Amino acid sequence: MDPTTSASQLLQYAITGLTVGSIYAMVAIGFNAIYNVTEAINFAQGEFVMLGGLVMVFFHITLKLPAVASFPLTILVVTITGILLDRLVIRPLSKPTVLNMVIATIGASFFIRGAAMMIWGKNPFDLPPFSGRDPIMFLGAAIQPQGLWVIGFLLVVVIALTLFFDRTIMGKALRACAVNVSAARLVGINVKYMVLASFALSAAIGALGGIVITPISLMEYDRGPMLAVKGFSACVLGGMGSFPGAIVGGLMIGLIESLVAGLISSGYKDVFALSVLLVVLFAKPSGLFGSIAVSKIKKF
């Protein structure tokens, strides 16, 4: 560490890391929403984030609709995309094993990315921040107001999901499918409907992440794969299927990347983040909050 590095600089790096890590955490939560029901990894999850940003640009910038109208419309459009992904890609599979679903979502990812390129082109797009671009000074560190929105929306997602899974019938049905699909089917739960609901939920969470991050880092058609990789890394680090693990994993990766970029070099941030991931997996293969039980492939 450079001896001239001040406490305010470290705070600045930490704030930036928490902001970026919150996006990774939201992507990871979207991964887990589907994994808990199907045990498959939806590699189109990053495309939901990309669509969230670009569809918001379409409604708010192109059509000039107010943000309060564009926001729910964007969530709705991307959620419908998630439903269509289940209906048109996953449901038609004759034998929906984990491997088949992974391959199907990879193909869907390429299709969505190509469609986005045809519609929006290759140029990056920006959105106006929710509360201005003037930074807030705190202990010598400059905080972008949009960064607070990102962290705030992560907290909202966590609280909403907690209430959803603990207090609603559908949430409890999804949890039952996560524990044992066969038992859930025996007590009358429509597992195929739960799979559809998990895709819709993950798409909505991804869209929310895309909306809040676009004013900070812009959005373009090919941002999805990298976001998916970072979100998947957060899932693995925290433990597949664990929502607390997704949050902790995302924040950890964001903090590591920011601190390494600021203190050493931005070229090494991915190396250090991957190294920490590998160390954790060597010490605890299930991740920080994952179960060590080996689960069976679920059929639905």
Image: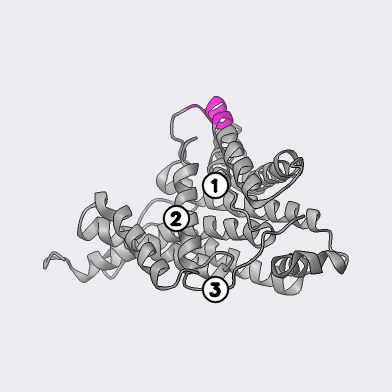
Please report whichever mark, 1 or 3, sits nearer to the chain's N-terminal start: 1
C-alpha separation, residue under disc 2 versus residue under disc 1: 17 Å
| Circle on res. 11 | none
Task: Residue under label 2, please give it.
Answer: 146
- Labels 2, 3: front one: 3
SS of the residue under disc 2:
helix
Front residue of 216/233: it is 233
Q: Quadrant of residue 51?
A: top right
Q: Which residues are magenta?
A: 114-121
Is 39 positioned to the left or the right of 272 in the image? right
Is 193 positioned to the left or the right of 222 in the image? right
Measured from the top left, where is residue 7 in percent x and y? 22, 71
Q: Quadrant of residue 81?
A: top right
| Circle on res. 292 | 3
Dot 3: within a 10 Å radius of its alpha carbon, few (fewer than 14), some, or many (20 or more) residues?
Answer: few
Tell me the kind of residue under disc 3. Ile
Magenta-span inclusion, residue 229: no
- Labels 1, 3: front one: 3
Front residue of 119/31: it is 31
> What secondary structure characterizes most of the magenta part?
helix
**Who's the residue at 72% across and 41% down the image?**
84
Please report whichever mark, 2 or 1, sits nearer to the chain's N-terminal start: 1
Measured from the top left, where is residue 11 in percent x and y? 29, 68
Front residue of 239/281: it is 281
Tell me the kind of residue under disc 2. Gln
Dot 2: within a 10 Å radius of its alpha carbon, few (fewer than 14), some, or many (20 or more) residues?
Answer: many
Task: Residue under label 1, please give it.
Answer: 49
